[in-house]
Image: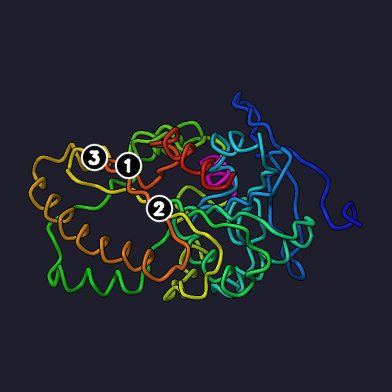
Amino acid sequence: MLAALLAPLCAAVAQPSGDAWADAARHQSGFVEVAPGVRLHYLDFGGNGEPVVLLAGLGNTAHAFDDFAPALTGRHRVIALTRRGFGESSHPVSGYDTPRLVEDILVALDRLHVDRAILIGHSIAGEEMTRFAGEHPDRVAKLVYLDAAYDRVLGDSLINRVFPAPLDIPGRPGPRAADTASAAAYVDYVHRTRGVNIPQSDIRARYHFDGWDEANTFAYQSIGVEHPNYRAVRAPALAIYAVTDTVTQLEPWERNDRTHAAELQKLIRGSERVERVLRAQFHDQVAQSDVLEIHGGHHWIFISNRDEVLRAVRKFIQ
C-alpha cells in the first residue's frame, strides 16, 4: 500500500545542464498525496527510533534542514516536509489557511505511517505546530519551536503601539540582475545578504521551482497567521528564541548601515520589549514548556547556533 501512495524516489533538486553543483545531503526524496491533485514533497533522512518531523519556515522547503536533520538520526527517524505552494510540492490556488495546512501534515503522517511524532518547526511553522498539537494531541510526542513560538497577531498589535510612526530604516537590498542570472549567483546573494549559510539545496529549490522572488508568489502572500491556542497544547514543548541585543548582531546589510544605526538600535529595543511579552505568553500558557534564549542568534537559529541548538534539542527529545 505504501508503494501505491508514494511517488518513486527522485533526485532532490533538478539542476540545469552545465550546473556542476549536486545535493550531497543523505536523504531520500518522495511525495505524498494530501488532497486530490496536491502532493507534498518530503525528505527522509533515515535513522531509527521515535519519528521526528521537520517543518520549514515561510517560503522554505524540506531542504532547509539538510545540514541539521542528519545530526538527529542517531536516535530518531527523521523526515522533513515542504508545505503546499513551495518548492517541489504542488502549487494549488487555494488551501493556504492554517487549518488546511495542518490537515496536510496529518494526512502526510498517515501516508508515511507515522502514528506519533516529535514536531520541530522553524519560523511560521509554529502556527501549524500549535494548532496541530491542540487538535491532534495523540499524534504529538513533543514540540520544538525554532524561533517559531510567537503570537504574531498580538505581536503586530504591540509593535504598532511601540512604533506608532514608521522608523527611518531602508528595506533589505534587492538582488541585481547578475544576482538572479543563475542558481549559483542567487545562492551567493542570499548568503551574502542573510549572513548565514542557508543550505544551497533549499535556495536552489526555491530558485528553480518558485522563482527567485518567492515573496511575490501567490502561496507566500496567502498564508495567514492566527492567535495560537497555547492552552490546548498538552505535549511538552521547547521554544528556542533568537534574541538580538545590538546592531552588530543584525544581518550584514543592516549592521554595515552606519547612517541608520541609531534607528536600527531603536528598532531592536522596541522589538525586544514586544518579544519578551510573546515569550512570556508561550511559557505561561503552554502547560509543559521550556524556553531557551540565545542572544546574538540569527532567525535561522539552527544554522547560526547549530551546536547549541542541537544540544538543547537532543536533550529535550531523548
Residue 147 marker: 2
Q: Quadrant of residue 261?
A: top left
**Disc 2 and disc 3: Cα gap in Å?**
16 Å
**Disc 3 and disc 1: Cα gap in Å?**
8 Å
Q: Quadrant of the C terminus?
A: top right
Residue drawn at 51 percent across, 36 percent down: 199
Q: Main secondary structure of the magenta part?
A: helix
Q: Mark 1 sits on what residue?
A: 297
Q: Earlier in the sequence, mark 3 or mark 1?
A: 3
Position in image of residue 115 (x %, y %)? 75, 60
Q: Earlier in the sequence, mark 2 or mark 3?
A: 2
Residue 168 against residue 107 in the figure, above or below: above
Q: Mark 3 sits on what residue?
A: 249
Give the extent of the magenta segment.
202-209
Q: Amino acid at mark 1?
A: Gly
- Mark nearer the viewer, 3 or 1: 1
> Tag 3, which secondary structure?
helix
